[in-house]
Image: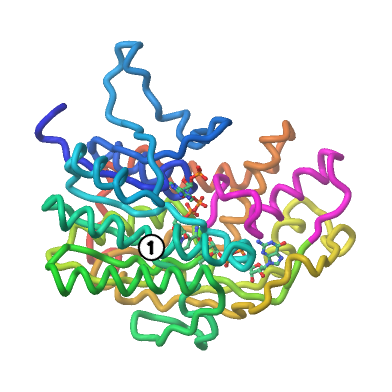
Amino acid sequence: MDAQRKVALVTGITGQDGSYLAEFLLAKGYDVHGIIRRASTFNTRRLDHIYRDPHNGDEVHLFLHYGDIGSSGNLAEIIRQVQPDEIYHLAAQSHVRVSFDLPDYTGDVTGLSTVRILEAIRHAGVKTRFYQASSSEMFGAAPPPQNERTPFQPQSPYAAAKLYAYWVTRNYREAYGIYACNGILFNHESPRRGETFVTRKITRAVAGILAGRQKHLYLGNLNARRDWGYAPEYVEAMWLMLQQDQPDDYVIGTGEAHSVREFLDEAFGYVGLDWNDYVRIDQRYYRPTEVDYLLADARKARNQLGWIPRLGFRELVRIMVDADMELVGLDSPGEGRQILSKQFDWHRWQDQSISMEQRT
Ligand code: NAP
Ligand code: G4F
């Protein structure tokens, strides 16, 4: 291994954010180590395009380790072996509705896993920087817009678990001087979004209906409003947080919110369909307590990190619908593809240097 290369360890590397973060860090010249769960089927689908097989004689900078964030010993051993410069803790039971069905499991995996990693860092004495994937869901019932000073009012076992992880991250920063940051990220989506989150459920349904594979789309509360951004931009914010002189906590979001109903308008409208003809309400998708309105005030990230989102809601929806149509073998309208090639040249990330003046 090249001693000059920085080393990152990513939990949740097989997830939406983990896969984008791995790409981003590789493009920045890191060696990236990821923790993956042993599963009976392949769960590395989102990483296939960046995986290199050492047996082919390829230069390898992505390394995968079997592990589970429920196991302290396993995490400590991986951290001891890898000696990372930066740890990004993204793994979680990340579905809010599911957390009502699995509250104690979610508390363990989404909440306690953070203290497992922080304890491993402390005991191993590894000089590493730590990123905690905190969530806007922690704001819950707090009125919008929400920023770093907004009092939290969690509305689900998921949010309560994330809140524990948030506070323990701050506590280890203050008590033990660990460079530990909370990224309080608002919803961010992409063609790699898990299929049961509402945005992806909708864009897949548009494609399924057009392909004649699906007749209806069953949803819950259409009135909830979310601040939806584009996931690849959000992993850059994670990295920026760990490059500052001092550790801190940051809200990340677009500053624009839309309802689920508006997402339906945009996604179905893009391909000339009226969602009212296809959407049915199913009470099963309602939550015992809902979060009505999340809207980021991300001025701190803009001013201190120089982070600003480039893609808006309309573009995001087009990118996702195009991708899902292509996945089922349909020609897409292509506006999403065009936006990506014009505005978001992923592979130029490593050379991209947007000056602070441009961004603030
Ligand atoms: P995701 O797609 O659901 O990915 C979750 C990752 O965690 C997957 O790699 C999953 O592995 C892994 N994982 C789950 N349980 C595990 C366990 N016991 N041991 C090891 N790995 C485990 O989530 P995401 O959207 O990328 O989000 C990343 C993080 O940011 C999560 O912590 C989420 O709660 C938080 N967050 C997300 C958003 C958002 O809008 N996306 C906003 C705020 C915060 P498998 O692939 O094997 O399932
Ligand atoms: O897409 P969702 O499941 O995302 P939610 O609950 O906002 O959580 C996501 O964002 C959080 C950040 O704020 C993350 F921390 C978390 O890990 C996850 O990534 O639901 C969005 C809204 C909700 O109000 C929900 O009630 O859509 C509403 N909704 C309506 N029908 C539905 C459905 N959500 C889902 N998943 N499925 C439905 O059929």
Coloured how?
rainbow
Q: What element carries label 1?
A: helix
Position of 3 relative to 301 (above/below): above
In what quadrant of the picture does the C terminus appear? bottom left
- Taking the spot 82% from the left edge, 65% from the top edge, the residue there is 282
Instruction: Give x and y (percent) for residue 171.
Output: 23, 74
Task: Find ligand 2 in the image and state its quadrant.
Answer: bottom right
The residue singled out by tag 1 in the image is: 112
- Few, some or many residues within 10 Å of mark 1 (<14, 14–19, 20+): many
In what quadrant of the picture does the N terminus appear? top left
Query: What is the three-letter code of the residue carrying label 1?
Result: Leu
183 lies left or right of 47: left
Position of 135 relative to 34 (above/below): below
Position of 274 relative to 253 (above/below): above
Instruction: Give x and y (percent) for residue 247.
Output: 19, 67
Position of 79 relative to 200 (above/below): above
- Taking the spot 69% from the left edge, 51% from the top edge, the residue there is 203
Q: Find the magenta span and give its range.
A: 189-218
